[in-house]
Amino acid sequence: MTEGEFRLAYVPGVTPGKWAGVWAERVRDVPLRLVQIPAAEGVPLLRKGDVDAAFVRLPVDREGLHVIPLYLETTVVVVPKDHAVAAVEEVELADLADEDVFEPLDDVLPWGDRPGQPAFTRPENTADAIGLVASGAGTLLLPQSLARLHHRKDLTYRTVTDAPQSQIGLAWLEAVTTDLMEELIGIVRGRTPNSSRGRNAQQQPVRKKPPRQRSAPKRRHQKRRRT
């Protein structure tokens, strides 16, 4: 952590705004600086100390790191709006067997056997691949968050039910699990301030229950004896 701020990196497709908002409410004296990075740079930046934590796409080399898997993303195929795939709600990989499929150099899906037919080129990045799909040169499979990020009016996408999925995780160095890091973990996991293990949990005052007030004893009225 640099003096006066906590640096949180995130890869394309991750939207950290909600967590940043909770951080601003709970950790008012330390600003959270969001740093968008290419998918491949999360772990190198952590190891160099250039960021304090990072939302990364798994799997990653976990040596010296703590990694919390967070969620899996739906995989979709991007096609022109007049493509045959656009007429259905979802497809399987077998449905793409005759399609030319682009594989950009920054592809984040964990493929074994790639579907379809190799397209005529490997684009430099996902944005370039999207442009080629728009030209009618092929199709592209990617996480749904990236399809939304690169949305175009002339393209659409459909869920691929049996495709590999990309998983998002939160990573940081094992040697620097600070109170601020614990605070971030609590925010990402949806803990309340009182259940967090970070600074706020330590700073929460213990409220003592007020002592119970005893009611005054009732006075007994003695009956007068008749004389």
Image (tube, rainbow, N blue to C red):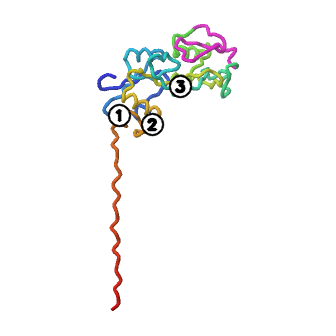
Question: Mark 1: which amino acid?
Answer: Arg
Front residue of this view, candidates 172 and 134: 172
Pointer 2 and pointer 1: residues touching (CB < 8 Å)?
Answer: no
Q: Residue at x 69, y 14 (%)?
A: 98
Among numbered discs 2 and 1, the one appearing first in the sequence: 2
10 Å neighbourhood of mark 3: few (<14), some, or many (≥20)? some
Question: Mark 2: which amino acid?
Answer: Arg
Which residue in the protein does label 2 denote?
191
> Where is the C terminus found, in terms of image quarters?
bottom left
Query: Which dot, 1 or 3, sits closer to the camera?
Result: 1
Q: Residue 117's spot in the image, x, y percent?
A: 66, 11
- Label 2's element? loop
Q: Which mark is residue 145?
A: 3
Pointer 2 and pointer 3: residues touching (CB < 8 Å)?
Answer: no
User: Above or below — where is 64 with respect to 207?
Assistant: above
User: Above or below — where is 4 with respect to 62?
Assistant: below
Q: Is residue 50 left or right of residue 145?
A: left
